[in-house]
Image (cartoon, grey):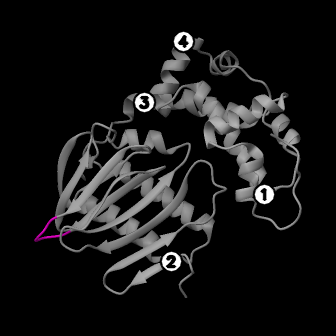
Amino acid sequence: MARPDDIFTENKLKFHVFQVERFVDLNLYQYGWERTDPLHSYGPHKRNHYLFHYVIAGRGTLYANEQAYPIEAGHGFLILPDQITTYVADGTDPWEYTWIEFDGLRVSESVSLAGLGADQPVYTPQNHEAGQKLRDQMLYIVNHPQDSPVRQIGQGFLFLDLLVQCSAGQRRQSQRRLRDFYMKEALSFIEQNYQRDISIEEIAAFCGLNRSYFGKLFRDSMGESPQAFLLHYRMARAAQMLKETALPIGTISAMVSYANQLHFSRAFKSVYGVAPRTYRQSHFIRKGAVDHDGI
């Protein structure tokens, strides 16, 4: 049975919204399939998350970076967060495509490994069979909205893996093994110690690297500085607690290493655009009273 947030039109459109937001490494936001009308267009528009389309049939054009990218069946295109784009189906041979909107702490690295980015939004699979594997995985997600959230996120990770493994622009990882080892060590340290006031020097020392070299490795691997990653990780954990618990905001602040609640509020707002209390009022997912302290 379709949920209220699902749109389903026989032979034309399937659209589903993923409503669980507690996943940090990867989260899905919406996904679907559509057989578009001639000259069907969307935009100009700016997305909050990554949005990937795989074109099953037909052709059209993506307009991004002040350029036009013709895209036909067997290829895909990626839209980045905060990137203004427009895409238009062909007038005589319009698109049929499937799409997934997603984000998370591990997404930037996967996108980079697939050879995609602001300057390279067009996705080309290694061969026809590789493209079919990616298409089938995306359609599996679209056609199984009734699966549990954990299972859907698991399928999302399989999609990310195929996005990389099936890409003709894949960046080979054989030279990345040592760097990947350091990053696993760093991420494990952050996950176990983010509650403390840890420094980047402390993380680098744990990995046995000097701070400068560690910073370069981290940025190359994760697409952002270790300082930014640590901030985003802490705020993601704080957001999860704001949504799922009634803990006072001051307590949550201390649990993500901010002894000063005002500093925590400023950091949270820099990531989510609103103060912690405002965020909780909009996202709280349990019935019952919540605290009214905070900034």
Q: Residues within 10 Å of mark 3 (few under 14, many from 20)?
A: few
Tell me, for residue 6, which label it has, or none.
2
Which amino acid is tagged 2? Asp
Residue 104 appears in the figure: yes
Quadrant containing the C terminus is: top right
Q: Residue at label 3?
A: 176
Circle 1 SS class: helix
How far across and down, in percent of the image, does residue 73 sit?
A: 19, 63
Tell me, for residue 289, which label it has, or none.
none
How far across and down, in percent of the image, does residue 11 sit?
A: 31, 84
As for residue 155 lying within the magenta part, the answer is no
Q: Residue at label 4?
A: 212
Dot 4 or dot 3: first in sequence order is 3
Dot 1 or dot 3: first in sequence order is 3
Look at the magenta stretch and give its main secondary structure. loop
How far across and down, in percent of the image, does residue 269 sit?
A: 67, 38
Q: CA distance from mark 1 to mark 4?
A: 38 Å
User: For the residues carrying marks 1 and 3, which lies nearer the camera in this image?
Assistant: 1
Numbered marks: total: 4
Q: Residues within 10 Å of mark 2 (few under 14, many from 20)?
A: some
As for residue 91 lying within the magenta part, the answer is yes
User: For the residues carrying marks 3 and 2, which lies nearer the camera in this image?
Assistant: 2
User: For the residues carrying marks 2 and 4, which lies nearer the camera in this image?
Assistant: 2
